[in-house]
């Protein structure tokens, strides 16, 4: 591979960046910068899939006519989860699938349903926020924050639609207390009263034309209309609703409701002396989500890619992993089982499907549960098991846990190793120390629900759940190449790794 000319330092330990891995890393940066919320992640994914020739289908329709062998499709649920797949031309009902799952959400602060606050004799305007997931919340202090999400708005024809919103200006900040006023050994704070952003000075708000007086909920207005809730401009600062309305291209009175989270406006970038790092928000798990999308797209890039394929290649990007996945669009919902069931009975015109096609498909399939892993931390080496210390830029990490916090087992490792050998991608192994807590993923819950062979893996990173994490720039290309090869080779390799065989 070609070595870029931009590298000028020459140390034996340096990790050089090839033009190819730089291209992947930069493309990932544009993906993550465009995707501050799960809704934006799905929109970014949709754009890439449409460009690659995938067609959008809907869960509410019958797929009997819409889905054909040799086709590439995707569907979304709630605008925050997505499944994309390609159907082999040699597909038969009950055949196996190469599945790969990731998640679209990250810990964040979400704007409360009634967020308008004034503090300190009404001098500061503040915005009430709710914690989502297990964030390293101290990292949210003194960052240049803004809001993004989706708004439900009424259009001129009276229809109600969902609009993506991303305010680019840094309008919010959670200020720390000056050290002169309190010398804390460790930084502790109240998540209710001190993790509380300011959005401006009230004097500015007072100089702006005020919104019309709010009608009281439960009472009829002058024109006889019944209002069950307080007006949205009373629940939130009118200026915030105004920004959302402007972004959505509607009048303030047509903003009906919204789901907004806070995000850091500082763009993700390459970092380190040789650009070997990625400094970014949401590496967990947009790193793996990006690699899943690009991996399946690359595996289906050639027109005849599905000609000799007997299976289905499928990625699923789930919302709500950080809060346990038990939602309508989470990994613990019927989303993936329902899609697998519908596809498992897919037949050519004229042929019929077996009543046990779903169960047959599950047994022949495999799931790669892809979520970020922990790189060894140079300042806390004692926290890591001595013989399992993954490093950044050394390839995806297979995660193993005797107590099944990860779903990996030996048949899965053997298959992954074979795929990686063919792809020329290095792998690493990870277990936690016996005296350490262990995270988990969507792997165990999906493998239990479906009885599918599962491998947990992910790229190594530092500072997981910080507002600014650190990952390896080379690892993006490694994972895309690995996922591409998995999709290309699974149907053939699957038959060679039998555990419950009759011989
Ligand atoms: Zn994760």
Image (spheres, rainbow, N blue to C red):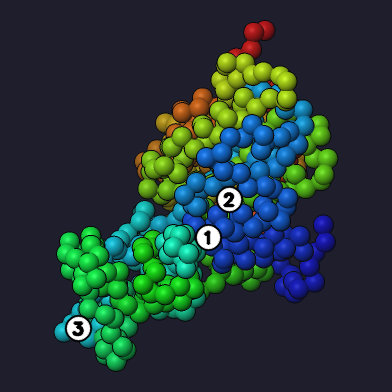
Rounded to the nearest angstrom, the CA distance separating label 2 from label 1 is 16 Å
In the structure shown, which secondary structural element does the residue marked by tag 2 occupy? helix
Disc nearer the start of the sequence (2/3): 3
Q: Is residue 218 left or right of residue 188?
A: left
Which residue lies under the disc numbered 2?
A: 288
Badge 2 density bin: few <14, some 14–19, many ≥20, Cα 10 Å: many
Q: Position of residue 238 (x, y in %)?
A: 32, 77
Q: Relative to 440, is 309 above or below?
A: above
Residue displayed at 46% across by 76% down: 246
Which residue lies under the disc numbered 3?
A: 122
Q: Say which quadrant the N terminus sits in.
A: bottom right
Disc nearer the start of the sequence (2/1): 1
Q: Is mark 2 within 8 Å of ligand 1?
A: yes
Disc nearer the start of the sequence (3/1): 1
Rounded to the nearest angstrom, the CA distance separating label 3 from label 1 is 35 Å
Q: Residue furthest top?
A: 503
């Amino acid at each position: 591979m070609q070595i870029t000319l931009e590298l000028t330092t020459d140390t034996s330990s340096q990790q050089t960046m090839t033009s190819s891995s730089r291209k992947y890393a930069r493309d990932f940066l544009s993906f993550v910068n465009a995707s501050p919320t799960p809704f934006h992640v799905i929109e970014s994914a949709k754009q890439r899939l449409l460009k690659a020739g995938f067609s959008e289908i809907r869960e509410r329709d019958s797929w009997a006519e819409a889905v054909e062998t040799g086709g590439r499709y995707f569907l979304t649920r709630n605008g925050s989860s997505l499944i994309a797949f390609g159907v082999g031309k040699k597909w038969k009902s009950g055949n196996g699938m190469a599945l790969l799952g990731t998640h679209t959400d990250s810990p964040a602060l979400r704007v409360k349903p009634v967020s308008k606050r004034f503090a300190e004799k009404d001098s500061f305007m503040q915005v009430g926020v709710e914690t989502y997931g297990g964030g390293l919340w101290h990292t949210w202090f003194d960052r240049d924050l803004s809001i993004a999400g989706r708004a439900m708005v009424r259009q001129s024809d009276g229809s109600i639609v969902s609009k993506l919103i991303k305010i680019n200006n840094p309008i919010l900040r959670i200020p720390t207390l000056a050290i002169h006023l309190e010398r804390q050994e460790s930084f502790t704070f109240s998540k209710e009263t001190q993790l509380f952003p300011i959005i401006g000075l009230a004097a500015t708000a007072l100089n702006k034309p005020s919104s019309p007086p709010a009608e009281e909920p439960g009472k009829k207005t002058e024109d006889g209309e019944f209002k069950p809730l307080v007006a949205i401009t009373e629940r939130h600062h009118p200026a915030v609703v105004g920004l959302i309305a402007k972004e959505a291209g509607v009048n303030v009175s047509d903003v009906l409701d919204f789901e907004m989270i806070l995000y850091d406006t500082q763009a993700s970038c390459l970092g380190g002396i040789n650009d070997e790092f990625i400094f970014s928000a949401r590496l967990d798990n947009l790193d793996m989500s990006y690699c899943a999308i690009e991996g399946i797209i690359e595996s289906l890039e050639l027109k005849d890619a599905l000609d000799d394929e007997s299976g289905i290649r499928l990625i699923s990007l789930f919302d709500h992993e950080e809060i346990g996945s038990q939602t309508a669009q989470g990994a613990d919902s019927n989303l993936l089982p329902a899609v697998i069931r519908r596809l498992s009975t897919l037949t050519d015109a004229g042929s019929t499907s077996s009543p046990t096609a779903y169960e047959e498909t599950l047994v022949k399939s495999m799931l790669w549960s892809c979520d970020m892993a922990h790189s060894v931390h140079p300042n806390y080496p004692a926290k890591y098991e001595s013989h399992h210390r993954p490093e950044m830029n050394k390839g995806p990490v297979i995660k193993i846990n005797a107590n099944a916090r990860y779903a990996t087992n030996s048949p899965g490792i053997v298959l992954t190793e074979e795929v990686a050998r063919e792809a020329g991608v290095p792998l690493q192994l990870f277990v936690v120390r016996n005296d350490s807590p262990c995270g988990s993923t969507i792997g165990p819950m999906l493998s239990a629900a479906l009885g599918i062979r599962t491998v947990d893996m992910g790229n190594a990173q530092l500072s997981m759940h910080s507002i600014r994490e650190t990952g390896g720039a080379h690892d993006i290309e490694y994972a895309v190449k690995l996922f591409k090869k998995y999709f290309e080779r699974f149907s053939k390799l699957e038959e060679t790794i039998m555990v419950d065989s009759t011989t």
